[in-house]
Image (spheres, rainbow, N blue to C red):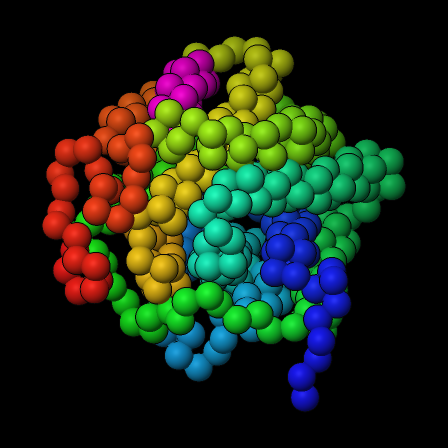
Amino acid sequence: MTVTAKSWQTPKNLMIVMSVAMTLAFATWMALLNNFVIERAAFTGAEIGMLQSIREIPGFLAFTAVLVLLIVKEQTFAYLSLALLGIGVAITGYFPSVIGLYLSTFLMSVGFHYYETIKQSLSLQWLSIDEAPAMLGRLIAVSSMASLLAYSFLWLAQGYLNLSYETIYLIGGSCCLGLTLFAWLGFPRFQARTPQRKHLLMRKRYWLYYALTFMGGARRQIFTVFAGFLMVEKFGYSVSNIAALFIINHLFNWAFAGRIGALVGRIGERRALTFEYCGLFCVFTAYAFVESANWAAVLYVADHLFFSLAIAIKTYFQKIADPADMASTAGVAFTINHIAAVVIPALFGLVWLVSPTLVFLMGAGMALVSLLLARNIPLAPRAGNEVVVGKVVYSSEGAAG
């Protein structure tokens, strides 16, 4: 039976609903994580590094998403992934041990990374090149608003309501499951503009995109894993303190992310990424030597704002890619992104035990490498003009390069 779509049943609104569902669950998991593992499971830098490496393993295996698409449509796959994410978060509080946290984290992460892979593919298929930067920025702003709701609730839950970790994790996961059910029942199945290739592929002419993606995975771990851990271990931030910091963080994101997306569309990917990596180099260097809890908080907010500019990597790929490559390349790109992400948390967790300063200085070095790669993006990237140096011959049939 064919159902006529109502005015609100659009791909853009579906992306918004799914982004909110993902954010409510993942923000809950992430905001509580450092306090939960230290208070309930006595984690050190080594255990938190190993947990984050385990969390990234499903991202490393994201290339398998294209195989799942042989039997499941992308939109349905996104719903199933969100459901798995919600379940993983909901049960986290009930397993306060090293092994229990490793297992619940892996379950949550399978859903999270498959969803993120499919989301990237669907967004680049459903959005035109002209509207993608602004809409991707708007999705970041929407996610920040959802994060604000989650962190405000966490601040109230632990600061005033005295809710347990178990209850808060259960609420966060259940919100994700509820919104996923709404999306499943409330939206029609949308058709992609271009049929997607259902096999793994890597094209030589995408090499700069792959390199930027790899370095993005490496840099992201410094912020995701060790910046938050620094706040708790060195400066003694409580759950309420972390939640308040995240609220400030996402207020800035909500206010500026849409403008950042529009800025990327206006100044181009090369200039946007150059600005991001210069800023991240300064932030990571400052992290290495910060001795003030307040200055550490300022750096945390600045770090998050600079990271918003990373949407330029996605829009760069959209401009140079064959439209039929979106799904298969999204899976390959997530795997490349997570090669470093699987290794770095565990390895740097050991480095942390010797010198937290060295961890952040190595992050500054990664930002410099990313900067050099960004300068190789042409001012007007397109198929056949993917890089400034290191060009590969482009075949319009997509067989070469």
Q: Outermost residue toward the right?
A: 161
* Residue for point 75% across, 50% down: 168
Is 228 placed left or right of 145 in the picture? Answer: left
* Residue for point 81% across, 34% down: 159
Q: Does the magenta stretch include residue 276?
A: yes
User: Where, by quadrant of the figure, is residue 79 drawn?
Assistant: bottom right
* Vertical order, 66 against 283 (above or below): below
Does residue 60 appear in the picture of this structure? Answer: no
Q: Where is residue 107 in the image (x, y as percent from the top left)?
A: 52, 63
Nearest the eye: 52 or 117: 117
* Vertical order, 28 against 103 (above or below): above
Is 328 placed left or right of 192 in the picture? Answer: left
Which of the image's four quarters has the N terminus? bottom right
Q: Where is residue 169 in the image (x, y as percent from the top left)?
A: 70, 53
Q: Where is residue 375 in the image (x, y as percent from the top left)?
A: 27, 27
Q: Where is residue 352 in the image (x, y as percent from the top left)?
A: 39, 29
Secondary structure mainly formed by the magenta segment:
helix
Is 46 placed left or right of 37 in the picture? Answer: left
Q: Outermost residue toward the bottom?
A: 1
User: Where, by quadrant of the figure, is residue 255 drawn?
Assistant: top right
- Looking at the rendering, the stretch of residues picked out in magenta corresponds to 273-287
Which of the image's four quarters has the C terminus? bottom left
* Residue for point 64% across, 38% down: 141
Does residue 160 appear in the picture of this structure? Answer: yes
Q: Does the magenta stretch include residue 103?
A: no
